[in-house]
Amino acid sequence: MQHPDQGRFATSVLPHLDAAYNLARWLVRDDHDAQDVVQDALVRALRHFDGFRGGDPRPWLLAIVRNSAWAWLGARRPGDVDVHDDELDAALVDGAPPSDPETLAIRRAERLQIDAAIAALPIAFREAVVLRELEEMSYRDIARITGVPIGTVMSRLSRGRHLLAAALRPAASDSRTMA
Amino acid sequence: MNDDDLWLDALLDDELDAAASLALQRRLAAEPALQRRLDERRALREAVRGQATRHAAPDALRAQLTAMLEPPASEPAQAPSRASAARARSPLRARLARPWAGALVGASVATLCTLLVVDPAALGWHRGQTVASQQTAEASEAVSAHTRALLVDHPIEVASSDQHTVRPWLSARLNFVPPVVDLAPQGYPLLGARRDVLSGETAAALVYRHGAHVISVFVKPAAADAGEATRVVRGFNVIERTQGGLAFCFVSDANPRELRALADLVTPLAGQ
């Protein structure tokens, strides 16, 4: 039995499969697990597609993928999604004003370094950074996808970028460990 | 990091309106340290966008999902090898072929958990329209006033935590007297106040801080007792309440519980 909406679903949702997989992959940090999450998400998306009327299907799909990933992690790796804003605050390093050599170091950072720095972010920061930098979602879409107010999106994004900058700043982190 | 980073990020992300962007550009011209922060943020953004891996969906996954959406009758003729490969790889193909009847039955326990936890209706997507229609123009205006004040980074005309400074300042400029009280001991320090205009009427805007959140409290004479309403407008929580002949509107990205705690402290003072 084929649902009559299946054709419409295929044309509106499948073009965003890479975005869906990219988000899932960055959230669960494993190729195989990310495929499971995307499969789950697509089943849900298809089941609820009749409730989706127009608009941009990409944030709609990414919201389902995001929630599937959190539920998947919650069931298997609860430590990954056990986030409290207080603990997120504690993850922050001091914000010394950047120097030109540090900016240069960030500019020269390589793919492996950058991927590792993103992967090491707490999940709430990581999803904001991935949705903004890789999927180029607006603050409003990120707020809808992640289910938090825009102000929270702004501060998570900012903190996430701050942690990335700190991780990619070799000169600064060296001098800090020396001191 | 500090609050400046929020505005620098918003500038790079093209999320500032023209006025806010101009205000920030002026500061950047005057503050080399701020300009260095912006340069670093821009370098980071270029590095991440240019270098970070964008994971493409694996071919196997794409084949499974594509096969699932092909009409079942024509499928064997069109792509027999791919369909059978997908079937061999995962029971998903069978699960998805009949999404309406089969998905739940074939789902693993884990998927069931997902189904129970994740309901797109809970994302607010479909309710968005209903909620939007409930929002009064005024709540929307209050949120605009709040965000506008935050974005230009000048939310305050009279900056003081001293209620004996703020209250006379407002009284001299308004034809009503809003309650002004510093609530620092309760975790809501008063930052100051300004005048704002809501629905064409001048309102007092008291600005409080709670943790990392800025809270705007708009106060003006109440036309009628409108009772209380709690809304979410464009991602901000809004509590409206009428008391002592004054209409209060609390706006913040602080959570509703924290916002209500402030409302419960402020509104009983109306008319005193």
Image (cartoon, rainbow, N blue to C red):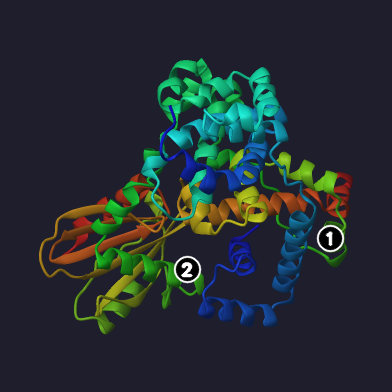
Per the model, the C-alpha gap separating discs 2 and 1 is 31 Å
Quarter where residue A126 is shown: top right
Judged from this view, the residue extending furthest toward the left is B224
In the image shown, does A173 or A129 lie closer to the viewer? A129
Marks 2 and 1: same chain? no
Q: Residues within 10 Å of mark 2 (few under 14, many from 20)?
A: some
Quarter where residue B183 is shown: bottom left
The percent position of residue B227, horizontal first and vertical second, equals: 14, 55
In the image shown, does A8 or B248 lie closer to the viewer? A8
Q: Amino acid at mark 1?
A: Arg
Chain letter of the residue carrying label 2:
B
Quarter where residue A5 is shown: top left
The residue singled out by tag 2 in the image is B150
Any part of residue A38 in sight: yes
Q: Residues within 10 Å of mark 1 (few under 14, many from 20)?
A: many
Q: Is residue B52 above or below residue B119?
A: below
The percent position of residue B20, horizontal first and vertical second, equals: 53, 76
Q: Amino acid at mark 2?
A: Leu
Q: Is residue B156 above or below residue A5?
A: below
In the image shown, does B260 or B46 lie closer to the viewer? B46
Residue visible at 46% across and 25% down? B98
Q: Is residue B87 above or below residue B30?
A: above
Q: Secondary structure at mark 1?
A: helix
The residue singled out by tag 1 in the image is A107
Residue visible at 25% across and 51% down? B264
| Quarter of the rendering occupied by the C terminus of chain B | bottom left
In the image shown, does A70 or B220 lie closer to the viewer? A70
The percent position of residue A155, horizontal first and vertical second, equals: 56, 54
Q: How many marks?
A: 2
